[in-house]
Image (spheres, rainbow, N blue to C red):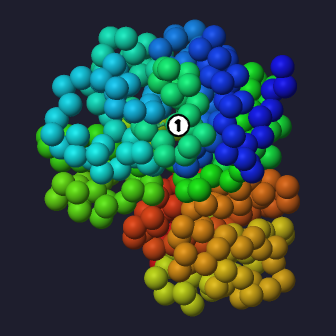
Amino acid sequence: MEKYIDLKNTADYSSLEKAAQIIRSGGLVLFPTETVYGLGANGLDEMAVKKIFKAKGRSSDNPLILHISDFNMLNDIATDISEIEHKLMDAFWPGPFTIILNRKPIVPNSVTASLDTVGIRMPSNEIANKLISYSGVPIAAPSANISGKPSGTNISDIFDELSDKVDCIIDGGNSLVGLESTVVRVIDGIPTILRPGKITPEDIKKVVGKVQIDKHIFSKLEDGEKVLSPGMKYKHYAPNSKCILVYSDNNDLLVNKIIEISSSYKTPLILSTSENVQKYEGNLVIDIGSKYNLDEIAKNIFTDLRKVDKFNPDIVIVEGVKQDGLGLAIMNRLIRACSHNYIEL
Ligand code: AMP
Ligand code: MG
């Protein structure tokens, strides 16, 4: 069977029946969602789920998100859902929003890393939605990338690292959002953001009147410290070279600091917002997009981080953005990409 299904320029989704058959029979499928690409398997099949961990080199204590296509599937896997949790799902599904709920026993331990909760999302991407409904089971899927690398937001970025490890590749073009979903758990009645994403704290507050942000979104873990979302522990999104993230509200200070750092290296590479690109003349620069268009930066940031490795620089200096709205999610990914090597002026 042809492994590759091209759905970039068609609305004829009949070929997804084949992919759904692969999911049902325990195989692995690379598929698009509106956030990033997913590496999916039947979320109720323990053996199939284990293949995901193996393919990614993912630690088994880092749980997966179950992707559903409708509310009937929700009731098969989650229980004791509160009114506030219902409100959040109604507001943000389908879309880039994951909620942590109490799980039913049918969900395999390998999906939840043996926690008594499960992360659930209903994607809005039509290909993802059809694939799940044709499969008839929730699809467990982490981001499509080898663990530690930037998440895949188009097939060409991840083809080399994953094509041999999957049974089917569905190409749906570039991911719309470009960052993984916002992960929320309601704790003592308060929605708590465990991973920031396209759905911002302000969006959540508008729906239920309150929100809090888990402190580990930015801080480094102390030894032995417990986290609510095991994914927070892991090195993530990192290029091969050493990276440093720099930010200031004062643009002159920011640019001068970056020039100062770059001058003490032989082959620096700067990831710059469009507004500042010309200020780094003489250096190797990748334009990450306008600081006035955070949607554009989010959409391209993982591809930009992947481009870095082609140049093998001795330092990568990344311009940060203001931590407002979507800026919170962008900075969360960049801080991890830079292994918490962060200067704020
Ligand atoms: P990824 O698979 O790369 O999108 O990452 C999924 C994220 O969701 C990771 O940070 C996980 O730790 C988090 N997650 C999944 N399930 C749970 C859960 N039951 N409780 C807390 N966090 C979860
Ligand atoms: Mg991931």
Q: Is residue 34 left or right of residue 284?
A: left
Q: State the quadrant of the N terminus.
A: top right
User: Residue 246 falls in which quadrant of the image?
Assistant: bottom right
Name the residue nearer the viewer: 221 or 323.
323
Residue that label 1 marks? 129
Q: Residue at x 39, y 70 (%)?
A: 324
Left or right: residue 244 compared with residue 136: right
Please name the residue shown 74% across and 26% down the image.
168
For residue 40, above or below residue 345: above
Element under disc 1: helix
Name the residue nearer the viewer: 129 or 12. 12
Q: Nearer the viewer, residue 89 or 212?
A: 89
Amino acid tagged 1: Asn
Q: Quarter-wise, where is residue 244 in the image?
A: bottom right
Is residue 68 among what the camera can see?
Answer: yes
Query: Does residue 35 appear to the left or right of 260 in the view shown?
Result: left
In the rendered image, residue 285, in percent from the top left (x then y), is placed at 77, 74
Q: 39 above or below 259?
A: above
For label 1, the crowd category at 10 Å Cα-Cα, with few meaning under 14, some 14 to 19 and many 20 or more, is: many
- Give the residue drawn at x 30%, y 43%: 89
Q: Position of residue 14 (x, y in %)?
A: 68, 31
Decide if ligand 1 comes within 8 Å of the CB at mark 1.
no
Q: Position of residue 275 (x, y in %)?
A: 64, 85
251 on left or right of 301 = left
Count of all numbered marks drawn on residues in the image = 1
